[in-house]
Image: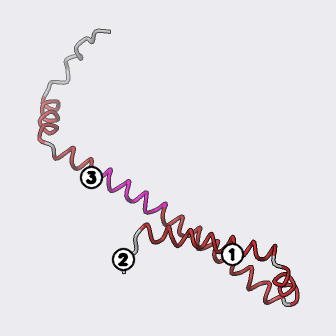
Amino acid sequence: MHLTQRHWRTAGTLSLVAACLIAGAGIRWQALRLALRTSVWYFVGYWGLFFLFIAVAVYLALLDLRYIRLQYAAAQRRLIQETFEDQEFRNALRQASTKPHDQPPPDRPD
């Protein structure tokens, strides 16, 4: 299976939705609040699951940010290669390098 940006964005969204549902149920559902108060392990497990979903969402957001930066760097590298491979650019660069440097630049009209 090939993971794409769409897959981890969907997983991150679902993780945030799950965390919101867990938080909402912990606040609003009376029976759950009573169960969480009776046992420390229920409480730790329940809110641990909440923080796990939050951590997964943050990790996937950072993964997405890194992927976007990687795409940007690859596109930038490709544009530089295309520019330097252009024959017209090479000719202009060659002419500029062979031009004598001791002459002042021509006056530009303002």
The residue depicted at 24 percent of the width and 17 percent of the height is 105
Residue 51: assigned label: 1
Q: Coloring scheme of the render? A: secondary structure
For badge 2, the amino acid type reads His
How far from the left and from the top, in percent, is residue 5?
43, 67
Please give left or right for residue 95 compared with residue 71 in the image.
left
Whole-Å distance between the Cαs marked 1 and 3?
40 Å
Quarter of the image where the C terminus is located: top left
Q: Can you tell which quarter of the image residue 47 is in?
A: bottom right
How packed is label 2: few (under 14 Cα within 10 Å), some, or many (20 or more)?
Answer: few
For badge 3, the amino acid type reads Arg
Q: Mark 3 — residue?
A: 78
The residue depicted at 48 percent of the width and 64 percent of the height is 64
Q: Nearer the viewer, mark 3 or mark 2?
A: 2
Dots 1, 3 in contact, CB < 8 A: no
In-front residue for pair 34/60: 34
For badge 1, the amino acid type reads Phe
Please give left or right for residue 90 compared with residue 78 in the image.
left
The region drawn magenta spans: 65-78
Q: Mark 2 — residue?
A: 2
